[in-house]
Amino acid sequence: MRIDYAAIGPEIALAAGLSLVLMVDLALRGRSRVLAGWLSFATLVVAAALLVPNHGRLPVQTLGHMFVLDGFAFVFKALMLGSAAIVVLLSIHPMRAHRYEGEYYFLMLCAVLGTVLMPSSRDLLMLFVALELVSVPGFVLAGIRKRNARSNEAAVKFFLFGVLSAGIFVYGISLIYGFAGTTDLARIAQTSRVAGAEPLLLVGVLFIVGAFGFKVSAVPFHFWAPDTYEGSPTPLAAFLSVSSKAAGFVGLMLLLLVGVPNLAGLWGPVVGGLAIATMTVGNVLALRQRHLVRLLAYSSIGQAGYMLIPLALIRPYSTDPMAGSNAGLVRGLAMYLLVYAVMNLGAFAVVIGLSKQYPTLLIRDIAGLSRRAPFHAAALAGFMLSLGGIPPLAGWAAKFFVFLAAMGVGSTMAVVLAAVMVVNSVISLYYYVGVARAMYLQVPEEVGAVRFPPLITAVVAICIIGTLVLGVFPEPFASFARSAGITIFQS
């Protein structure tokens, strides 16, 4: 079997980089351990540099068709590497005072390797390996502050739900293998077209959908998220809310759109029900939150509901006639994930900057922040309003592309899902605007400036610029996302 090393170049770079971080950290002492963070960032830059030259020779298959680098994989690998680079930059200042700095970056790069491997996986076993490579380091990172009771609770809950989802995933694989005699997604699709809606296949698919539901924190698999986000190091919460969630959606798309696309009429309503429950529960429970990170956790759950809408509306197809609307739905989801990454990482960047001065991170702590840190308050207000879908910020463009794709389908379920999304977007404005109201209208308990590390300020600036650019000029980025929608149906 011939291996295309250029195609797997980013994965090789990440594997080499995480090994180097682990070895270099053994020789570092004191403040010099911050070099582990910068070495991790350099690893991600090298991985991205090795990805770019592959764009001109897509698609590429290697490792016996288990690994495919096409337009779909390229788009999401770029998203994973970019968001991971931001998370590493956000980690450098908070991790500087901790003894476990090197271990943190080693485990973070392991999880990033899983997220980058996911978009190229075309086999259920490789999907499982990628999913666990994302999850297992997260279990350890959530509890890395061993003397912190909330961190221990976060790790235990994350671990228990994660192990359960892994068992469900493996059982689903066994059922599908028993039906199709293979774990290759393309061959499963061929077998399912001939056999149709076999109960064994459907049950296996539903088990794996449940496992990915845990990863994207979809209701009813969301219970771990608020406590894990609150108890974990805040940079890890940012990673879980963006990169880990995006990896879950990518795996879900590959299973449903490459493995069993002809059964969309059966799994589509199930995903639609999950979408309605997820966006409604996430937004309604967020209304009661007074802790910033928990609010962002429930916001993340609600946003996952919006992202499930395009998947729920995929229609069965055998030849080209449906490919246009299906590709538009995938483009809408890819665009939403891109926009969500920028605005959510920006919001977490401000929260991380506040965490040293305000360890409790309650909403009342940011009262009057507009007078003590004007730029950061304006940026956080922008990110919150963008998450709520207020134009001309990027969030409106993400919701618009999903809404447009849903209306293009024109079915009754599409109309219902679009209507529920609009209603939930209105509900979400209450708590998003509530954060801005606290910063601009409430009287602060303290007087004096809030100081943010320069690196975090730089990340906030990059994210707010990205939020504005994506909102005002979304079309170039939508064109980039379009290749994901076109090529996934050619896998």
Image (cartoon, grey):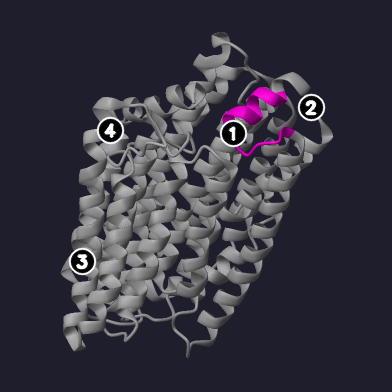
| Viewer-side residue, 163 vs 210 | 163
Residue type at tag 4? Val
**Kind of residue indicated by mark 2:** Ala
Label 2: which secondary element: loop
* Residue placed under numbered mark 2 in the picture: 197
Q: CA distance from mark 2 to mark 1?
A: 16 Å
- Look at discs 3 and 1 and give the one toward the viewer: 1
Q: Nearer the viewer, mark 4 or mark 1?
A: 1
Q: CA distance from mark 3 to mark 1?
A: 36 Å
What residue would you read off at disc 3? 39
Please give the residue where the numbered disc 1 appears in the rendered image.
Answer: 185
Identify the residue at image location x=43%, y=24%: 487
Which of label 4 and label 2 is nearer to you? Answer: 2
The boundaries of the magenta stretch are: 180-192
Quadrant of residue 43 within the rendered picture: bottom left
Provide the residue designation for mark 4: 472
Q: Earlier in the sequence, mark 4 or mark 2?
A: 2
- Judged left or right of residue 8, residue 263 is right
Instruction: Give the CA distance from mark 4 to mark 1.
Output: 38 Å
